[in-house]
Amino acid sequence: MAMLSLCCCNDSKQTFHPLSPNGHISFSEKNPLLLRSRNTLPPPPRPRRIILVRHGESEGNVDETVYTRVADPKIELTKKGRGQAIECGGEIREMIEKDGADDWKVYFYVSPYKRTLQTLQNLARPFERRRIAGVREEPRLREQDFGNFQDREKMRVEKTLRILYGRFFYRFPNGESAADVYDRITGFRETLKADIDIGRFQPPGERSPNVNLVIVSHGLTLRVFLMRWYKWTVKQYEGLYNFGNGRMLVMEKGHGGSLLMHHTEQELRKFGLTDDMLIDQEWQKRARPGELNYDCPTMNSFFTHFSDEDCLT
């Protein structure tokens, strides 16, 4: 059998970038030679904040029977929900402008559901084009899949069973559990971390420390994101509540990223944080990226044999 000889170009004299594995096109984040040369440069600045935004009021929030007629990804915002999103965008801009920086920008990650896309469109109204560094539609930020909503009475039974068996592990028939959402959010977190590490949200040629990341998603998904980020336990997760439609939670730099940099203790207790979780948030104010909290009070709930003296040291 004759062997085929394949050529990638007609010009044998054509030259290629010496560090590129693919002709003239180089994907620097995948090229080990470029990565090694980049190691001599300081890392890109980390984002000033990560702002979590729950979508505005939707038709399903007002009337649960909508789910029996409209597919969950296609449910829209109400007029009130659109107003909530515009108001939230104004609050975000006001918060950022208080920093006093001239070069600030926002970069958006958004769930592909219609109500989150509509939230983003209205949320962004207070921002000029030059202030928006970019946007990425991210399917892993979608709402928990509750299965088929066509039978309203059956869904009421399923939601009752979820409370009985536990809000984290109970899986809806033909749908997901919060534990399933945790798995895909873990993947998104790794993508987000990689984006931060290489400064993907930075405009070309810029290295500004004043970029704010905004994640527009759903109540349960955002609770699971926080659980994954701060390594909260299942029990701690099950004590959390959704924050309001069109509202935000802000993870802001101390040295680490703490909810207490922007929110009061009373606000976070209303959200469901316990004493142990608040103590850890105080530590997060001072923590540097990659550090572990060796004095984390959650250890005492796992290991009950410690004496009071052990806990104080």
Image (tube, rainbow, N blue to C red):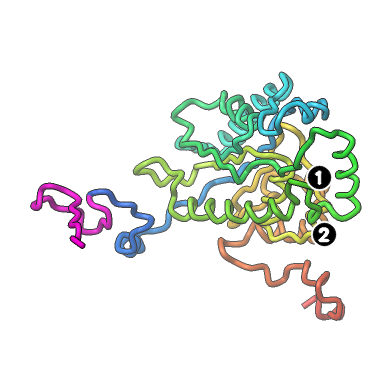
Residue bearing mark 1: 241
The image quadrant where one finds the C terminus is bottom right
**Residue furthest to the top:** 79
Residue bearing mark 2: 235
Figure quadrant of residue 203: top left
Amino acid carrying label 2: it is Lys
Question: In the image, is residue 103 part of the stretch drawn in magenta?
Answer: no
Q: CA distance from mark 2 to mark 1?
A: 13 Å
Amino acid carrying label 1: it is Tyr
The magenta stretch is: 1-23
Say which label, 2 or 1, has the lower sequence index. 2
**Along the line of sight, the residue nearer the viewer: 153 or 4:** 4
**Along the line of sight, the residue nearer the viewer: 1 or 95:** 1
The image quadrant where one finds the N terminus is bottom left
**Along the line of sight, the residue nearer the viewer: 36 or 267:** 36
Residue 80: give x, y in percent of width and height: 74, 21
Reply above or below: 309 against 88: below
Q: Residue at x 61, y 24 (%)?
A: 122
The dot on residue 197 is: none
